[in-house]
């Protein structure tokens, strides 16, 4: 484990608490914060390889091994913060990193990821490396990618993306709540990104602000990606069991035969609603379903959907899994997409400025997937999304209709799902057996 990972749990909890309090935006995250006394700053990992001295005048003597500094990104870090922690003070580097398109991957700093810097014996930069999110690859693993920045010898810098093959491993871990979820996850050496995903998965079942209790337990299986024995990133949670207040909640990721993906409990019930409440975030309703004075034709007509006012260019997301039944222009609707969801349900998204790149009729989309952008095409007096919810092709009020709780698995998928659960359950049961044996030993 790197020294960055060996910091006290107190320091990590203080950092989370301060950032969550400052943002005040994520309620579930606030439940995870535990205020502890202040702790020393996070240590920086320094390493230098010690070798026998080469003969004087040899190339190795003229170019000794560089000094390597490494640090992990924390929430709220800026590029300037990271360079300061690494001891890098190179003229023009910060400007290059924040303005040059070739270094654009550093614009997004992922907490928990690593940045390294190599410095020569005169404290000049040899290279800077940012290990960012692994991308998709072959079945045997993924491609681990990082940004590498080097001086060009002319007073400027160059940046290139580098890639190596990484292997996927299934990690198994468990934890018990004593002070907070993050504290338990730290004890189990579970990365923060995986812990936050656990909150997202169980957020519809467990109120992490009010329901978390001392003695609650969780058991988890998740993907981790490694290269040359070193972890370079984490992936999806594959299976999860959370015991809260004596009640057991479960989740397993499943890809059905129709191209839909999501989490289901061990009985096969979906953990997500079949439809999102809105197709765009941070919006307001400008016109409801029902009779209204038409803003252009100036007469009372039936309004078949709900209008959501939003700035032009605001992303529009599919409210449910479905297939693109129509994408193009229609009189009045302007640029419009109609999705055939499942069963008797379909949805319509009108007045778009443009559609998501590469989206065509017949394509399958998943709930929450970007499909277009708010605009003012067709009969519209201002930028907004006109959203229709249809049952048997008849528009109904999406704000009052009883939305289906979840899309059920069809019989063929149920068989595949049961086989997947049977594949994961032995690992979950093994963790439970280990815990029971520890309890029995402690009681003797």
Image (spheres, rainbow, N blue to C red):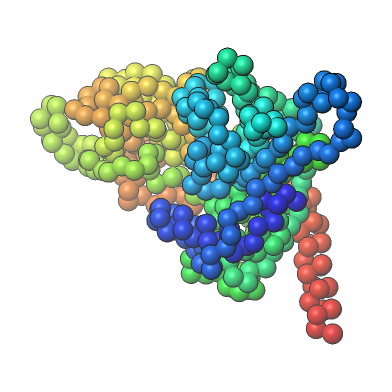
**With 350 as the anchor, is 131 left or right in this view?**
right
Q: Position of residue 205 (x, y in %)?
A: 54, 61
- Residue, far top: 154
Which quadrant of the view contains residue 151? top right
The relative height of residue 48 versus residue 7 in the rendered view (above or below) is above
- Residue, far left: 298
**With 294 as the anchor, is 283 left or right in this view?**
right
Residue nearest the viewer, comparing 161 with 388: 161
Q: Position of residue 285 (x, y in %)?
A: 26, 43
Asked if residue 416 can be seen in this view, the reply is: no
Which quadrant of the view contains residue 57? top right
Q: Position of residue 295 (x, y in %)?
A: 14, 31
User: Residue visible at 52% across and 57% down?
Assistant: 16
- Residue, far front: 56
User: Residue visible at 49% across and 60% down?
Assistant: 17
Asked if residue 426 can be seen in this view, the reply is: yes
Number of dots carrying numbers: 0
User: Residue visible at 84% across and 85% down?
Assistant: 444
User: Residue visible at 67% across and 41% down?
Assistant: 70
Which quadrant of the view contains residue 137? top right
Q: Position of residue 263 (x, y in %)?
A: 61, 48
Residue nearest the viewer, comparing 98 with 396: 98
Residue nearest the viewer, comparing 247 with 86: 86
**With 220 as the anchor, is 331 left or right in this view?**
left
């Amino acid at each position: 484990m790197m020294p960055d990972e060996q910091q006290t749990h107190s320091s990590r909890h203080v950092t989370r608490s301060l950032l969550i309090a400052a943002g005040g935006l994520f309620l579930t995250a606030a439940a995870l914060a535990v205020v502890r006394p202040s702790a020393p700053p996070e240590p920086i990992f320094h390493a230098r390889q010690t070798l026998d001295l080469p003969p004087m005048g040899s190339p190795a003597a003229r170019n000794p091994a560089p000094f390597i500094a490494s640090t992990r990104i924390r929430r709220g870090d800026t590029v300037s913060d990271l360079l300061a922690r690494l001891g890098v003070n190179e003229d023009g580097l910060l400007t290059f990193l924040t303005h040059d398109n070739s270094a654009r991957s550093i614009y997004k700093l992922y907490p928990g990821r690593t940045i390294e810097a190599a410095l020569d014996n005169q404290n000049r930069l040899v290279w800077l490396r940012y290990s960012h999110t692994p991308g998709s690859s072959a079945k045997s693993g993924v491609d681990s990618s990082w940004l590498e920045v080097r001086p060009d010898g002319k007073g400027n810098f160059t940046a290139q993306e580098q890639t190596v093959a990484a292997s996927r491993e299934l990690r198994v871990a468990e934890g018990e709540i004593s002070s907070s979820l993050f504290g338990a996850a730290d004890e189990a050496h579970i990365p923060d990104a995986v812990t936050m995903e656990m909150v997202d998965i169980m957020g519809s079942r467990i109120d992490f602000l009010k329901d978390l209790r001392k003695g609650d337990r969780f058991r988890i299986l998740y993907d981790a990606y490694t290269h040359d024995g070193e972890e370079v990133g984490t992936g999806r949670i594959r299976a999860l069991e959370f015991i809260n207040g004596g009640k057991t909640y479960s989740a397993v990721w499943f890809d059905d035969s129709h191209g839909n993906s999501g989490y289901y409990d061990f009985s096969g019930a979906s953990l997500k609603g079949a439809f999102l409440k809105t197709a765009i975030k941070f919006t307001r309703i400008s016109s409801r379903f029902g009779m209204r004075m038409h803003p252009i034709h100036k007469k009372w007509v039936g309004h078949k959907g709900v209008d959501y006012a939003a700035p032009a260019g605001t992303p529009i997301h599919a409210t449910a899994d479905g297939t693109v039944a129509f994408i193009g222009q229609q009189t009045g609707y302007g640029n419009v997409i109609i999705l055939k969801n499942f069963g008797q349900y379909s949805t319509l998204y009108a007045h778009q400025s443009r559609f998501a790149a590469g989206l065509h009729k017949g394509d399958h989309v998943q709930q929450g997937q970007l499909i277009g952008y708010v605009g003012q095409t067709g009969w519209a007096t201002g930028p907004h999304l006109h959203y229709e919810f249809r049952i048997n092709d008849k528009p109904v009020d999406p704000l009052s209709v009883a939305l289906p709780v979840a899309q059920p698995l069809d019989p063929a998928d149920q068989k595949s799902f049961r086989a997947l659960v049977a594949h994961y359950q032995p690992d979950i049961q093994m963790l439970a057996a280990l815990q029971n044996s520890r309890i029995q030993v402690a009681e003797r």
